[in-house]
Image (cartoon, rainbow, N blue to C red):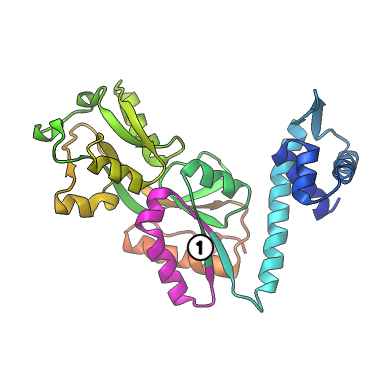
């Protein structure tokens, strides 16, 4: 069993077909089939069930996949770390939409300013997609606003954040001195897409109070949401950080929602088995400084492996 076998196994598991995995790896299909056969012979169990010309990963295959992703990722980390003696060290950083729009550029600029040799590559998406990439070891770390579900990920609060209810000045509810969640029943809303931490927190609050709204717009970016708001298309719940300028200028209005306070954290997330390279340790040290500035618990940096 070799790293090559594991790379092929991961590709087949992700693609669901031998032929598609072979295409992605630029290999002949018999080569891929042979590698899977050798793995199954080595471990003495079936890794895939072949039913109606489709592949279905077995429980044993699922267990192996978790190990394989991290063995391959740590091998790649080793290769990159050794080669970084002559190249600029690199970090793959993920962030959710709100984090990317609010705080990420400041964090990265500060880090690269203090460590000029380091380079950061950034990937922005919703919480669900960021979590999936962390589990596949495609990212070194991420900062997210939503809740991650996997127990294989370590989560540490980094920034406090508040969601507020906002609308344009001409909205009928602006005249109300106070509002309750029940007053939002059937109101047209501009929402983030499924998988967004912002949407998940708001929808959970509505569900707990038996309130239904009209999802008139579904957007993937904060800028799209603000454009729809300014065009009078409804209201939204959004991070105060994203709309403070529009609130200050009077382009948008915060509505006084009385019976719920939607607070959360932007959190640092990384895989519990992640190899902590020297560059990643430096980034974690900066995050520890940020925690101190926010009066939040420090990262357990000394306990991290690497």
Q: Quadrant of the C terminus?
A: bottom right
Q: Is residue 191 visible?
A: yes
Percent coordinates x, y for residue 107 in the rendering: 41, 64
Q: Residue furthest front?
A: 231
Percent coordinates x, y for residue 14 in the rendering: 70, 41
The residue that appears at 28% across and 37% down in the rendered structure is 236
The residue that appears at 61% across and 61% down in the rendered structure is 305
Residue 207 counted in the magenta span: no
The picture quadrant where one finds residue 58 is: top right
Percent coordinates x, y for residue 289 in the rendering: 39, 66
The secondary structure that most of the magenta stretch takes on is helix
Q: Is residue 238 visible?
A: no
- 217 or 74: nearer the viewer: 217
The picture quadrant where one finds residue 104 is: bottom left
- Give the extent of the magenta segment: 93-119
- 74 or 129: nearer the viewer: 129
Asked if residue 242 lies left or right of residue 267, the reply is left
- Mark 1 crowdedness (10 Å alpha carbons): few <14, some 14-19, many ≥20: some
Residue identified by numbered label 1: 301
């Amino acid at each position: 069993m070799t790293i090559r076998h594991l790379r092929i196994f991961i590709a087949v598991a992700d693609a669901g077909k031998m032929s598609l995995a072979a295409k992605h790896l630029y290999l002949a299909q018999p080569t891929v089939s042979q590698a899977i056969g050798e793995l199954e012979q080595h471990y003495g169990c079936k890794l895939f069930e072949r039913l109606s010309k489709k592949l279905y990963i077995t429980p044993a295959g699922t267990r192996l996949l978790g190990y394989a992703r991290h063995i391959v990722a740590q091998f790649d980390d080793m290769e990159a770390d050794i080669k970084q003696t002559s190249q600029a060290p690199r970090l793959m950083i993920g962030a959710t939409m709100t984090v990317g729009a609010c705080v990420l550029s400041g964090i990265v600029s500060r880090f690269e300013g203090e460590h000029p040799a380091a380079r950061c590559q950034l990937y922005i998406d919703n919480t669900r997609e960021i979590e999936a990439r962390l589990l596949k070891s495609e990212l070194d770390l991420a900062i997210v606003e939503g809740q991650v579900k996997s127990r294989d990920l370590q989560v540490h609060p980094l920034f406090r954040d508040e969601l507020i209810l906002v609308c344009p000045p001409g909205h009928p509810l602006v005249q109300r001195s106070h509002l309750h969640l029940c007053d939002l029943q059937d109101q047209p809303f501009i929402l983030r897409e499924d998988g967004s931490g912002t949407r998940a927190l708001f929808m959970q609050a509505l569900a707990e109070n038996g309130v239904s709204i009209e999802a008139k717009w579904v957007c993937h970016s904060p800028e799209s949401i603000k454009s729809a708001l300014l065009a009078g298309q409804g209201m939204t719940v959004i991070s105060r950080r994203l709309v403070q300028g529009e609130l200050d200028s009077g382009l948008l209005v915060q509505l006084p929602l009385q019976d719920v306070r939607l607070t959360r954290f932007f959190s640092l997330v990384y895989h519990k088995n992640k190899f902590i390279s020297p560059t990643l340790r430096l980034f974690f040290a900066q995050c520890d400084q940020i925690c101190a500035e926010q009066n939040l618990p420090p990262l357990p940096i000394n306990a991290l492996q690497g």
